[in-house]
Amino acid sequence: MKISQPRMCFVEPSAPARRLLWHALSLGSVTRDEPERHAGYDKPGVFLFWVVDGLGRMEVEGADYPLERGDCCWLVDLRQPRSYLPQMGSLLHTEGVRFSGPGVEAWLELLRGQPDFRFSDPKDMPMLRRSLRRLLTLVRSQPAGYEWDVHLILTNMLGKLLASRQILSTPPSETVPAVARVLAAVLANPARDWKARELAAVAHLSYSRLRELFRRSQQQTLHEFLQRTRLDQARRLLGDRTLSIKEVAAQLNFSSEFYFSHFFRHATGISPTQFREDCRT
């Protein structure tokens, strides 16, 4: 039998959905009686799945995870090489949804802040299974406005994962006024190539004092915040195929397309062109 996908549904989202919404790319179930191996960056998006029946293992990022039926699901970054390996003599039957959307990398950074891919909360699994059935119904019938409904369902599924990691349950640390002014300025103009002296002036502090307060308040360095903010803007602009890469570089205030490409490759491991190709798949 090898790898069987008769119940898989593949979706071609509209251009606005790709740019603005969480969108499903494929969903359904897969049965394997032999290894299924994937190279990194072979598909865009992330894969949320659970085991329906059988036993096996998943190899990803150099680690090995047992797969078995139970009240847990897995979220896999498809930029990583990965293998799904049925136990000898066992069929490994999984179901789930591959999806993507704006800011998916930021979600992964938050959700994958812990050292494995497994989400385990028994009370969530019935909701996730029902959501998958609703998604399948929507993408097969594609009624008017269905992509917005898909977006809402996927948002609710991601919300369950956030809750299981207790990411939003910790009271936020108090932001000192100087840091709040810097955050407001940067987020009001995220494409700008902000300089240290400019932000120190916004904060009405020396740069060394601002750097210290920012790290203590935001749990990250000011440089990390600026780089991540600019990278998020780069991904958003690259999603607009009416813009050339040169025009994206200009909007982000890079001196040339070369320097923008160097920045993007250093931050993500791939070129802007490859990022666009991955998003098209």
Image (cartoon, rainbow, N blue to C red):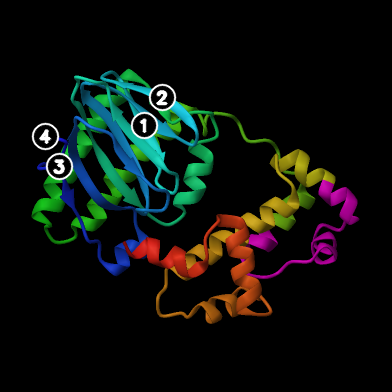
Q: CA distance from mark 2 to mark 3?
A: 23 Å
Q: Residues within 10 Å of mark 2 (few under 14, many from 20)?
A: some
Secondary element type, mark 2: strand
Which mark, residue 5?
Answer: 3
Q: Contact (CB < 8 A) between labels 1 and 2?
A: yes
Name the residue: 62% across, 59% down. 266
Which mark, residue 65?
Answer: 2
Sequence-wise, which precedes: disc 4 or disc 1? 4
Q: CA distance from mark 1 to mark 2?
A: 10 Å
Provide the residue span drawn in magenta: 184-211
Secondary element type, mark 4: loop
Residue assigned mark 4: 1
Sequence-wise, which precedes: disc 1 or disc 3? 3
Residue 189 in sight in this render: no
Instruction: Find out whether residue 126 is within the magenta segment.
Output: no
| Residue 143, horizontal then vertical, whole percent | 11, 58
